[in-house]
Image (cartoon, rainbow, N blue to C red):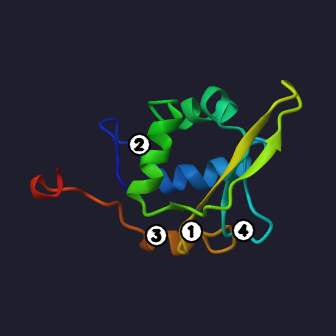
Amino acid sequence: MPSSKSGTVRKTFLEKLYDILQTSDPSIISWNPKGTVILINDKERLSSEVLGKYFRSNQFESFVRQLSFYQFRRTGLDKLNKNPKSGGVQPIMEFINDKFTRDKPNLGLTIKRKTYGVDDVK
C-alpha cells in the first residue's frame, strides 16, 4: 500500500470507497441489496458531508471521474428519489464494476487505475 511522506500508510481510492460504503448514511450512498452496485442516493450530501472526509476534493464530478478511472460504469438504470428535506426529486445514480462487490472486498484488489499516455489524449 502507498505510504505518505510521514511514513503512514495511505489508503487507495478503492479502499476509501469501500470504507465510505460501509460507514456512510445509506440515504446518501449505499450498496444495492445484492451488494454489486453502488447507489448514490443524494449527490449533494455526498459532496457536502462525505467526500471531504476521505479526499482532497469534495467535488462530485471529481469523484465520478475517479470511478471512471477504475472502470466503474453507469448502469443506465437510474431512478428518481424523493428528497424528504426539499420535497423535490433527484436521480439515484448507479455505478458498477464487476470486480468491486460488498461481499468480496479482496476482489477489488485486482482493479487497476487507468492511466493515459500522451498518445491517448485527443
Earlier-in-chain disc, 1 versus 4 = 4
Q: Position of residue 20 (x, y in %)?
A: 64, 47
> Looking at the image, which residue is at 51% across and 69% down?
108
- The answer to the question of whether label 2 and label 3 lie on touching residues, with beta carbons closer than 8 A, is no
Which badge, 2 or 3, comes first in the chain's sequence?
A: 2
Observer-side mark, 2 or 3, equals 3
* Label 3: which secondary element: helix
Which residue is disc 4 drawn over?
A: 35
User: How many numbered circles are shown?
Assistant: 4
Which residue is under mark 1?
100
For this view, does 61 lie left or right of residue 84?
Answer: left
Image coords of residue 6 (percent x, y): 34, 35
The N terminus lies in which quarter of the figure?
bottom left
Closer to the N terminus: mark 2 or mark 4?
2
What's the distance in space between the residues labelled 1 and 4, CA to CA?
9 Å
Q: Is residue 91 left or right of residue 106?
A: right
The picture quadrant where one finds residue 33 is bottom right
Image position of 3 (left or right of 19)? left
Q: Are marks 1 and 2 in contact (CB under 8 Å)?
A: no
Q: Is residue 26 visible?
A: no
For label 2, the residue is 8
Residue 109 disc label: 3
Disc 3 from disc 1: Cα separation: 9 Å
Q: Are marks 2 and 4 in contact (CB under 8 Å)?
A: no
* Kind of residue sitting beneath label 2: Thr
Q: Is residue 40 above or below residue 47?
A: below
Rounded to the nearest angstrom, the CA distance separating label 4 from label 3 is: 17 Å
In this orientation, which residue lies closer to the viewer: 34 or 11? 34
Mark 2 crowd level (few <14, some 14–19, many ≥20, 10 Å Cα): few
- Who is closer to the viewer here, 37 or 6? 37
Label 2, label 3: how many angstroms apart (C-alpha)?
A: 20 Å
